[in-house]
Image (tube, helix red, strand yellow):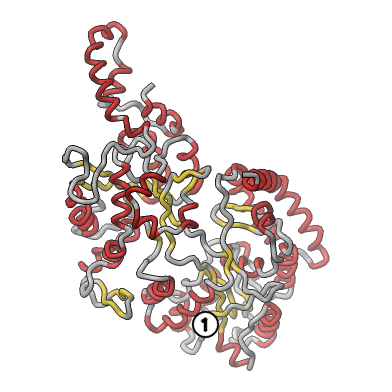
Amino acid sequence: MNPQLSIMNKIGANRQGHNPNRKGDVMMAASKKTWGKLAKLTLVMLMVGTVVLSGCSSGSGSSTNASDGDSGSNDGKQVTLKVEIFDRGNTPKPYTITDSYLTRYIQDNFGTPNNIKMEFVPVPRSEEIKKLNVLMASGGNVPDIVFTYDTPTFNRYAEQGGLTELTDLINEHGPNLKEFLDEDAMSYGQYMGKQFAVPGKRAFLGKYSSFIRADWLEKLGMKVPQTTDELYAVLKAFKEKDPGETGGKVIPFGMTIEPAQYDPLIWSFIQPTTEEQKYTLLQKLGANDYPTLLPGFKDALQFFNKLYNEGLISRDFSLDEDKKQLTQDVTNGLTGFLTEDYPNMYYADGTYDTLLKNQPDAKLTPIDPFTNSEGKHAKPEYAPNGMYIMIPKTSQHAEEAIKYLNWMADPDNLLALQNGVEGENYEMVDGIPVMKTDAPQEVIDRLYNSGDIAIIANGNFVGDETQNREKLTTNFPEKFQDLHRKAVEISATDTFKPVNFDRPIEAEAKYGTNLQAKYEEMIVKTAMAKPEDFEKTFEATMKDYMVSGGQAILDERTKVYQEMQSK
């Protein structure tokens, strides 16, 4: 059986019909009566097919030995490298999604010198997975480089044999890639110990910071809280003394049902854990690790219950699923404290900017008050990978694909793709490319989709970690940069990494969406219960969580961890 068709059948949940223009499909469609007449032609076609499909049966998936220099193929003929690109519907004129300043830059600086024609294949961002499934099922029509942010999609393609194994290709043609991607980041592109994706690497892993109305503290003569107990005392004072003069509408602790609002609080109660506990007792729901079964989780919910019953957090937090009410309460000067994704307060025309328009003397300052039993400000950080960059097994140009990603990983090339032209798009300030705010619109438009072009990077890479952090800050209004810099520092303090298995946990994929809703339900019900009813409410919601898939995840994670330890 044609190996290309075999792979298509494995991926075929969304497979489209045969393409009548493909030789293999013509052969399958030929009638038995005409078979004899086609025998000689068939023999020739099979010989050609052997050459065409040789990359499919090899470890690398490549049929060429393109050099890094002036040729992209064995015989010197130009080859076409197809690369997926997100179409967000925001392309400025006169560009198109496939013909822009950056696509031309890539052709001129990578494609032409290597005798490669670059072809960008647009995929609507809002339909990314659906469209990618169709492309993968199409066999020969799929781009040579595809990508997704969705972990289950990557795992499925790898499991079904639809991806090229990349270890040898990267070792031979990816020295820049290997230097750019450390071992931790590379591990996120592995399935069952084999490298099936090049992970896009995050420039910064911090997640959360807390923020407080420092002007309220000054009015009360209180210091910035440094521990959970000190924060509780401040919240009580905000409630009782209303330093913001809200007329009784004060919300000491702004809360929603989003992780950024409750995660720092909950993790501060989690006790020190062993490696085995992290692997077995955590529950990964979606992109986040949840401490549902770790020691201290119940204590966190009991403290949450105390805050709610004392009127210290937003009363209707369970209804605020998009943070709109929280944002409104902060900008109207009703909220004294909150936790949030670290950059969200300081955008131009953002939350703090709007608050200042309403209350010019307001001071919204980053702080880090939650402390655990060891006195640390424990909080999760992001996984080091962004997207999964993959080369389909059917690609005839896997070697060129890795060379392209390797070219992109060169610091000078990445600088140009992310920042444009020095003196036009940016100026170098202490080694940091600072974007020119007075650049003409047509110059700014060059980089409108730089994040979707420089796919190996999630965020701006300009040097070491300190420089990357500073680059983050330069993207914010100058008046907020000191505050943003502090929030960045807090988000990276006492963080811990997510747990990464060498294979997907099937129960998490099966039950994850439902369990995330059950987890939120547990938080809401235990918070709103009367203090005397907390114990029975916790037991009931935890039992419901476990029978709804939590136990299945626990059992599978324990089994996989034991298998990993036995290797």
The residue to which callout 1 is attached is 364
The picture places residue 383, in percent across and down from the top left corner, at: 51, 59
The residue shown at (39%, 21%) is 1
Q: Quadrant of residue 20?
A: top left
345 sits to left or right of 528: left
- Any part of residue 165 in sight: yes
Location of the C terminus (image quadrant):
top right
The picture places residue 312, in percent across and down from the top left corner, at: 68, 76
Q: Quadrant of residue 168?
A: top left
Kind of residue sitting beneath label 1: Leu
Q: How many marks?
A: 1
The residue shown at (46%, 88%) is 360
Q: Quadrant of residue 386?
A: bottom left
The residue shown at (64%, 43%) is 563
301 sits to left or right of 163: right
Foreground of the two, 557 or 151: 557
The picture places residue 240, in percent across and down from the top left corner, at: 69, 85
